[in-house]
Amino acid sequence: MSSRRFQELRVYQLAERLADDIWKIVNGWESLPQDTVGKQIVRSADSIGANIAL
């Protein structure tokens, strides 16, 4: 698969949208939950798209 083909996959696009939505949600949290569980959720969501791109 070429380096740009994964970006055309519907599953990749959905993963990116999910990550963006989670970033927005966590960004609105208070600092303690944002710094603890929020960072873990964001990293997990970001890794979905990254794993598809591999």
Image: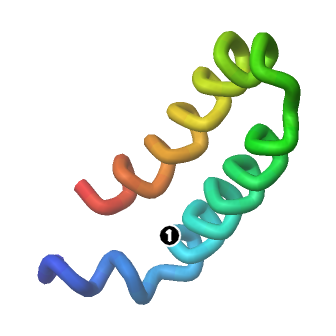
Identify which residue is drawn at 85% across, 43% down.
28
Q: Quadrant of the N terminus?
A: bottom left
Relative to 3, 12 lies left or right: right
Relative to 22, 20 lies left or right: left
Identify which residue is drawn at 77% across, 20% down.
31
Q: Quadrant of residue 6?
A: bottom left
- 38 over 53 or under it: above or below: above
Secondary structure beneath dot 1 equals helix
Q: Mark 1 highlights which residue?
A: 12
Q: Quadrant of residue 53?
A: bottom left
Identify which residue is drawn at 36% across, 48% down.
51
Who is closer to the viewer here, 11 or 15? 15
Most extreme residue toward the left, as rendered?
2
- 30 over 37 or under it: above or below: below
Identify which residue is drawn at 76% across, 54% down.
24
Q: Residues within 10 Å of mark 1 (few under 14, many from 20)?
A: some
- 11 over 53 or under it: above or below: below
- Indicate the position of residue 49 as horizontal and vertical percent values: 45, 56
Who is closer to the viewer here, 30 or 21? 30
- 13 over 46 or under it: above or below: below
| Type of amino acid under label 1 | Tyr
Most extreme residue toward the front, as rendered?
31
- Indicate the position of residue 45 as horizontal and vertical percent values: 59, 43
